[in-house]
Amino acid sequence: MNYMDNKISFSAYSALFNNVDNCIFTRNKVSNQVKWINKDDNDLNIKIKNEKRLKRILFNEIKSLYNNRINRYNLEGFSRINDEKIKDLEINKFFLVEDKFKGTSGQYSVFPRTFYCDKCGDLRVFSNTDEWKHFDVKNCRNKNCNGKYKQFNYVTFCPHCGQIKNIYPKCETHGTKYLKLIKNTENQKYWKVKCTKCGEFIDLYYSFCNHKDIYNLNHSISNEKSSKVMLLPVMQNSIFRSVVKTIVDVQNLEWEDNVDSIMLGSYLGKFNYLFSSNDNVNNPERILEYITTVLKTFEPHKENPQKAIDLGIIGPNLPQIVSNIENTITEIKKNYFDEEFTELTDYLILKNYFGDNKGNKKFTEYIEIHDSFKREFEKLKNILKISEITYIPDIHLISSSIGTNRGVSTLEDNYLNHFEPHWKSKDKDIFKVYSYPFETEGIIFDLNKVEVVKWLIKNKFLNGDEFNQFMDEDEAKNIIMNLDKDGEAYSHLKILLHTFSHIMIRRSSLYTGLDVDSCGELLFPKSAAFLIYSTSNINIGGFSFVFENSMIDWFQDVQLDIKDCIFDPSCLDDNGACFSCLYLPEFVCGFFNGFLDRDVFLGKTDRYCVGFWSIDIN
């Protein structure tokens, strides 16, 4: 490998978002850092239907993650992102190349540039480009040594301010010219560096971080006291982990700023007052069309509606109708956060509430034609608490890397990741996301909402006294819809859906022809549903085949998969999930294998007194 050849094209299809700005990949046992990814200016990707909606959703996610980090760690040296910064967000599509004649996907370089001889310990620290150009990794510079250089691939990470710093030791008198690495133990924490010129011993790295900005040492990013750093190995996903947000792409619609509110309001029946009691308003697509037509008609005359009424251009009742619609939209926005809009409207689009997926097939309808599945599916519905399974042949998704989590990631209480956007420059004035629009197929699983609410009540995540014990599907839907996203009930529902999703993905290769690396997932807690979709370059129709031929088999013995893990009882007792039973590759799982617990179904620990599959059917 030529270490100076920093412009080499490589395929990113298998793990697209592992190769974005700052992320690490390894080649020939040497770690490299991506400097930047080129954007697609030649429209090699498919079109993004609705970039304005995408930008709004991604901006709100970035703003929330970054500002929460600043608030949590009191990083007063960072500027918070305000709503006006949305104008400084760029949407870049990946420039994917298959051969070097079509250009390059981006640029990377060896990181860190610290090497030591595997025999004599000669330490080379490169901060000078000219020295790096003449570096020969295969030959030690000491004439009496026949050793080769190895990369010292460690950095320091401050858990408080989130800064990651290279380990570049130097002698105060002689700089980095005469350094030797002393490996007096197997633990890298205790390795020393010696200057062979003066004999001075030097600490390999500073054990404490003073929270000074590495780009401006006169600038402090936190007023907190110095904190102890962690020594982290530089390898894929160890120090920079890409944060990916996937949403459903929907066609551009009129009244873009309010389309999510109108969609959600239509689904919830908030606009039924616009129609007479004898009119059929069960078609949300029709409601959306009516409202957008009304708003579009009124828009040119909103400054002087009375004049338009006098001229007979609009009806006398139109201003009041528009006022009522706008008040309803305001009410919906007040009661539902923007991320809830995204989750719910994505679900509604997939379920064909607004006519985007004409070829959807519901399994309850499919078995009416193929009666042999009917009895088995009824058993599944009762045992596994599923209400519907829907095959979606044409899904338009956009996956976007919105930034990176720095350093150690954990799901401990009160811990917040050090999220950093993809800044375009060191000034942090413009930031960007990398988006990859694609078309695929998938299957969406809806859990029985009544059974979900009963399970939450029996585990005391919801107060049962507040709800009707004989609730119907609509009542249960409204309860789930109004769960607080920061509340206990929502969190455990998310664990339930995520665990179920992982079970089905891990079993998918047996029936779909797709291995776990070729699957993706989306969770919809507000709808008690989850989607599994194909991420393969070639759509082989695996989900179509399993839907029509092996759906019942896909669920076969699923309860046995949950019941046991080879690392039980410790796995179940600790957190109910591990690499042996539930984990998926991190580029498949959008939550880094968090929010997983087999006990949501079993109810064998003090985390859940009743398992979801143990609830009695009334």
Image (cartoon, rainbow, N blue to C red):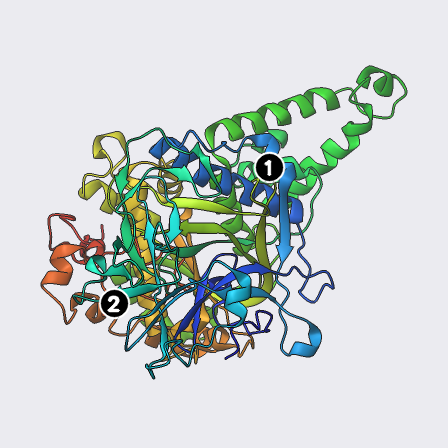
Q: Is 382 rendered above or below residue 527?
A: below
Identify the residue at horizontal 29%, vertical 58% (top origin): 198
Q: Residue furthest right?
A: 311
Q: Secondary structure at mark 1?
A: helix
Q: Residue at x 64, y 65 (%)?
A: 95
Q: Which residue was labeled with disc 2?
A: 579
When the figure is inspected, residue 425 is found, relative to residue 392, above or below; the finding is above
Type of residue at label 1?
Ile
**Residue picked out by circle 1:** 262
The circle on residue 220 is none
The percent position of residue 523, horizontal first and vertical second, equals 41, 53
For badge 2, the amino acid type reads Phe
Question: From the viewer's perspective, is residue 497 above or below residue 472?
Answer: below
| Foreground pick, 457 / 397 | 397
Relative side of 534 to 199, left or right: right
Horizontal and vertical percent position of residue 377? 34, 68
Image location (x, y in percent) of residue 423: 55, 46
Query: Which residue is at the front of the view, 299 or 219?
Result: 219
> Gap between marks 1 and 2, in whole Å?
42 Å
Q: Residue furthest front?
A: 198
The crowd level at tag 1 (other Cα within 10 Å; few <14, some 14-19, many 20+) is: many
Task: For residue 263, say whether it is visible.
Answer: no
